[in-house]
Amino acid sequence: MYFYELHEGDDDLFTDALLVHELEFDDGQFLEFVLDARQRVLETFTEDTLVEAVAHELERQHGFTFVDDARLTAAVNVSASEDGTFLADLTDEPGDGDDESGEALFRTLLVDIDPNDMN
């Protein structure tokens, strides 16, 4: 398996997508695939981010697998304490932060902040 990554940095919102393929493509060929997919979805995508739209298009057109949360089989929260290590809930049932349909009303964004840079 070969792994490929997409990054989006528009408007300081950084989104990454991990893709997997059975074949190895050189950098230039992968870039061509991405540019073509971007052009096809740019004006019409319905995903939350352009990166997700391009990843889905690469799945459809070139057989990549977009490794997103929908493909998770299991997730475990890992902590130094035993109580903090547990199987995370992957169900899509309405709950805190969800609307009635179970859709999340927010997205998580991991931000690396250096406390010494805070003003």
Image: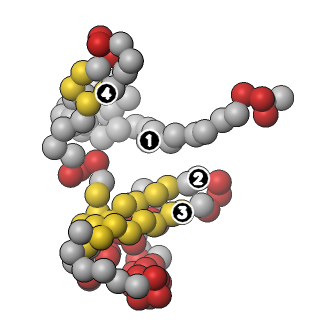
Q: Amino acid at mark 3?
A: Glu
**How many badges with numbers are in the image?**
4
**For this rendering, which residue is in front, 33 or 38?**
33
Q: Residue at x 30, y 80 (%)?
A: 24
Say which residue label 2 marks. Answer: 13
- Which amino acid does the dot numbered 4 rest on? Asn
The residue to which callout 3 is attached is 8
Q: Earlier in the sequence, mark 4 or mark 2?
A: 2
Q: Which residue is mark 4?
A: 77
Disc 3 residue crowd, few under 14, some 14–19, many 20+, Cα 10 Å? some
Q: Residue at x 33, y 26 (%)?
A: 78
Tag 3 and tag 2, C-beta contact below 8 Å: yes
Local SS, label 3: strand
- Residue count near mark 2 (Cα–Cα under 10 Å), binned few <14, some 14–19, many ≥20: few
Q: Looking at the image, tell me whether mark 1 or mark 3 is earlier in sequence order.
A: 3
- Marks 1 and 4, how far apart in space? 18 Å
**N-terminal-most mark, 3 or 2:** 3
Asked if marks 1 and 2 touch (Cβ < 8 Å), the reply is no
- The disc labelled 2 sits on which kind of residue? Leu
